[in-house]
Amino acid sequence: MLWHAEYAASSGVWTALGARAARAGLLPVLIEVGDTQGGPDEWELMPGEMSYPGDHDPEELLAEYWAYAVEEPDELDETIAPYDETWPGLAPAPESLPADPDIRAAETADALLDEGSWFKDPRLALVPARRSADIPAAIGWTGPMNYEDDTARICAILRDWEDRFGIRVIALTFDQLVLSVAAPPTTKDAAEAVAAEHFAFCPDNITQGDHETLAAYAEHAVRGRRVWSFWWD
């Protein structure tokens, strides 16, 4: 279930409407209605088919996804270095969050809505959800369907990232998820550890993305980055 505006969102709308809606149990998210897959009415949303994010252990899920993603490790030796087929475990959490996650979310939303953004026709939507990480499951989003058909399992990992890195779900398209990040990793080792989680979570980010190796992805898409974006083929 979600409600979205009938007019295009603009910078400032997240702060203007999102904070007030949150007090009523509605959380904001930007949605794209102008790409080739249309808006939520055409996304094949299936909220009744999703489980509950709190019923899943995020580290167990990431270990499971990692094993699936590296089923043929010989073909991925260079791609996943410095790791191998053994799940490396969770990245360490930062000692503190250097930014308020909700303020970072509003800043990120404004940046996405500025002129020149990749959004074609963004709308602000309001979703009844307990926490931002639950939004995809709450609306029955099926963006990762070719990889994971129970989006609540994806949201269990988002909950963990919410706790460790202060992420918020900022935007959804038919098959893309955009997060703001209050505490991105700042060192090479920490970024590579987070990149390993990203690879398990969404292998397409690396195997079909702009960076051919996990190490390059860590340096250019994770280290110090205040926005994490995921796309499933």
Image: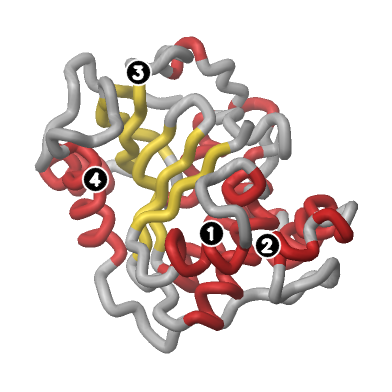
Q: Are marks 1 and 2 in contact (CB under 8 Å)?
A: yes
Q: Name the residue under label 1.
A: 159
Query: Which residue shows up at 22% across the image and 14% down it?
Result: 6
Query: Which residue shows up at 89% across the image and 53% down it?
Result: 72
Q: Which amino acid type corresponds to the residue marked 3 in the rendered image?
A: Val
Q: Mark 3 points at which residue?
A: 33
Position of 67 with respect to 230 (left or right) is: right
Question: How far apart are labels 1 and 3 at the CA level?
Answer: 26 Å
Query: Which residue shows up at 88% across the image and 59% down it?
Result: 74
Question: How far apart are labels 3 and 4 at the CA level?
Answer: 16 Å
Question: How far apart are labels 4 and 2 at the CA level?
Answer: 26 Å
Q: Is residue 57 visible?
A: no
Name the secondary structure under disc 2.
helix
Looking at the picture, how far across and down is residue 166, in whole percent? Answer: 39, 66
Name the secondary structure under disc 1.
helix
Which callout, 4 or 2, points at the residue further toward the start of the chain? 2
Q: Mark 4 points at which residue?
A: 109
Q: Which amino acid type corresponds to the residue marked 2 in the rendered image?
A: Pro
Name the secondary structure under disc 3.
loop
Position of 34 with respect to 150 (left or right) is: left
Q: Residues within 10 Å of mark 1 (few under 14, many from 20)?
A: many
Which callout, 4 or 1, points at the residue further toward the start of the chain? 4
Task: Look at discs 4 and 2 and give the one toward the viewer.
Answer: 4
Q: Residues within 10 Å of mark 3 (few under 14, many from 20)?
A: many
Q: Is residue 155 above or below residue 146?
A: below
Which callout, 1 or 2, points at the residue further toward the start of the chain? 2
Task: Look at discs 4 and 1 and give the one toward the viewer.
Answer: 4
